[in-house]
Amino acid sequence: MAPAGPSGEEHIRTREIRFRGPHREPDQARAAALLLAGREGVLEARPITPECLQVTYDLRATCLEALERLVADHGLHLDGSLLTRLKRALWYYSDEAARAALGSERGRGNCTDRVFAAQYRRHRHGCRDSRPEHWRRYL
């Protein structure tokens, strides 16, 4: 786990993402680094070995679970060994707890859906239901 940095940066984390083969891409860590480079919240993505990527990210913008999901959705194979799964579960939990303490847990903060829903409610348009709230539940 990454403790607070020397300048008190409790929201910066450095973790490892491990991959397994066989895969058509022999250097999965490099492919993942290219995928994550420039991503919001990712400060650094550096391949250590062809199967291990070291990623530094800002918890206020993203978490390890989201980064690993993105990598897996692009077809790279995450390591599924017992030790790696245990580490992953611990890191997911600590990220979620830290994000909750920072006020940016899942579903809050920069949630685009909530912003668009609030804007939708403010605009005048013909898509409003004129019935009282208690009628809407029954009809």
Image (tube, rainbow, N blue to C red):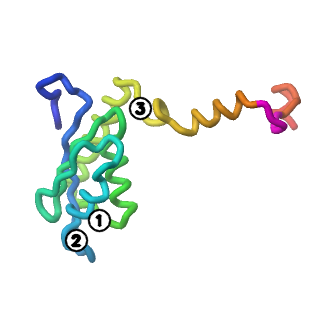
Question: Compared with residue 102, is residue 43 higher up or lower down, i.e. above or below?
Answer: below
Q: How many marks?
A: 3
Label 2 crowd (10 A; few <14 / some 14-19 / many >=20): some
Label 1 crowd (10 A; few <14 / some 14-19 / many >=20): some
Q: Which residue is mark 3?
A: 105
Residue for point 26% across, 47% down: 88
- Could you give the CA–CA distance between mark 1 and mark 2, rounded to whole angstroms? 7 Å
Mark toward the start of the polypeptide (3 vs 1): 1
Secondary structure of residue under mark 3: loop
Residue 37 location, x and y as percent? 28, 52
In the rendered structure, the answer to whether residue 117 lies left or right of residue 36 reads right
Q: Are marks 2 and 3 in contact (CB under 8 Å)?
A: no
Label 3 crowd (10 A; few <14 / some 14-19 / many >=20): many
Picture quadrant where residue 26 is located:
bottom left
- Could you give the CA–CA distance between mark 2 and mark 3, rounded to whole angstroms? 33 Å
In reply to whether residue 126 is colored magenta, the answer given is: yes
Mark toward the start of the polypeptide (1 vs 2): 2
Magenta residue span: 124-128
Q: Name the main secondary structure of what is drawn in magenta.
A: loop
Q: Which residue is mark 1?
A: 77
Residue 21's disc number: 2
Q: In the image, what residue type sits under mark 3? A: Glu
Residue for point 41% across, 32% down: 105
Residue for point 35% across, 30% down: 99
- Could you give the CA–CA distance between mark 3 and mark 1, rounded to whole angstroms? 27 Å
Q: Are marks 1 and 2 in contact (CB under 8 Å)?
A: yes
